[in-house]
Image (spheres, rainbow, N blue to C red):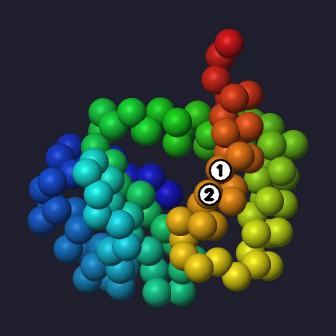
Amino acid sequence: MLVTVADITAEEDYLSPLLDVGYELRIREPGHRMVRTPALDVHIHLLEVKHPSVSAYLEFRNRLRKHAQDRDLYARTKRELLTQDWPDMNAYAAAKAEVITDILSRARPR
């Protein structure tokens, strides 16, 4: 899930409400925050409205909404990856990066 905020450094405007309902802060890096539930079933990426990654997230989402073949590929990839043990979320994210890049290449106008 993606949420955009006006100023990522103004954590008091958005982070406390998420933490108060049980989300845990997992990533705090320049321009990006990520929170998730303790059950690891919901991840929320927070970016500033004008962050360059926002358009990629939306292009990816739109492609999956419109193209069942890519949606199935992504779902199948995630299911396969879930059968493996990962040392951390970065390793899991890296493992699905090639599929995401492939799908994004079809989402972007040529």
- Dot 1 amino acid type: Ala
Q: Residue at x 33, y 37 (%)?
A: 51
Q: Is residue 3 left or right of residue 78?
A: left
Q: Position of residue 47 (x, y in %)?
A: 33, 48
For the point 15% across and 54% down, which residue is it?
9
Q: Label 2: which residue?
A: 94
The image quadrant of residue 34 is bottom left
Relative vertical location of residue 57 with respect to residue 89 in this rendering, above or below: above
Furthest residue to the top? 110
Decide if residue 36 is in sight here. Answer: yes
Q: Residues within 10 Å of mark 1 (few under 14, many from 20)?
A: few
Percent coordinates x, y for residue 72 in the rendering: 84, 52
Give the residue at x 58% y 34%.
59
> Under tag 2, what secondary structure?
helix
In the image, residue 24 above or below residue 14:
below
Marks 2 and 1 sit apart, C-alpha to C-alpha, by 5 Å
The residue carrying mark 1 is: 97
In the rendered view, tell whether residue 78 sits above or below residue 46: below
For the question of whether residue 65 can be seen, the reply is no
